Image (spheres, rainbow, N blue to C red):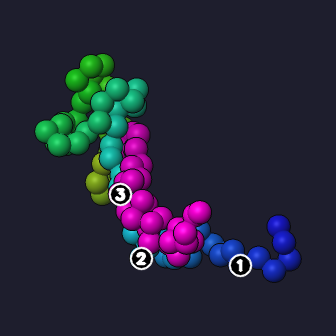
Amino acid sequence: MPNNENLVSKFYNAKKFMWPLGLGYEKYNVCPNYCMLYYGADAMKTNCDFYGSSRYKPRNAISKGSNKAEQQLRYYPLTPRLYRLFMSPHHTKDMT
């Protein structure tokens, strides 16, 4: 890395910087075998339609709080990224 880098020192600060730009992501629960996405009509299901595997991690009797998903998918929407790309001053120059 160059000596005069302008990188953030913590992951939290990087997320805090990126969120106002509209470059966040959405989390969706998926089957542990990645064969089913729990979204839309399937959002309330707790077991996979294909293999019958559980959507959530097993909990012990003393744990409190909500169920934790076995696997999650992070979806990065394309539209906000394209919007930010074409708003960039670097792309407004005449390319002749």
Q: Secondary structure at mark 1?
A: loop
Q: Secondary structure at mark 2?
A: helix
Residue occupying image coordinates x 28% and y 54%: 66
Q: Is residue 76 above or below residue 88?
A: above
- Within 10 Å of disc 1 (Cα), the crowding (few <14, some 14-19, many 20+) is few
- Provide residue 79's location: percent of width, then percent of height: 35, 57
Mark carried by residue 79:
3
Judging by the rendered image, the residue that carries numbered circle 2 is 20
- Provide residue 1's location: percent of width, then percent of height: 82, 67
Mark in front: 3 vs 1 = 3
In the rendered structure, which amino acid carries the disc numbered 3?
Answer: Thr
Q: Nearer the viewer, residue 69 or 85?
A: 85
Who comes first in sequence, dot 3 or dot 2? 2
Q: Secondary structure at mark 3?
A: helix
Judging by the rendered image, the residue that carries numbered circle 1 is 6
Q: Of all residues shown, which one is farthest toward the left?
A: 41
Q: Which residues are magenta?
A: 68-96
In the rendered structure, which amino acid carries the disc numbered 1?
Answer: Asn
In the rendered structure, which amino acid carries the disc numbered 2?
Answer: Pro
Give the CA distance from mark 3 to mark 2: 15 Å
User: Was residue 4 drawn as part of the magenta stretch in this picture?
Assistant: no
Residue 67 visible (yes or no): yes
Q: Nearer the viewer, residue 92 or 26?
A: 92
Left or right of 50: which side holds 8?
Answer: right
Mark carried by residue 40:
none
Residue occupying image coordinates x 45% and y 66%: 86
- Provide residue 72's location: percent of width, then percent of height: 40, 44
Left or right of 22: which side holds 38?
Answer: left
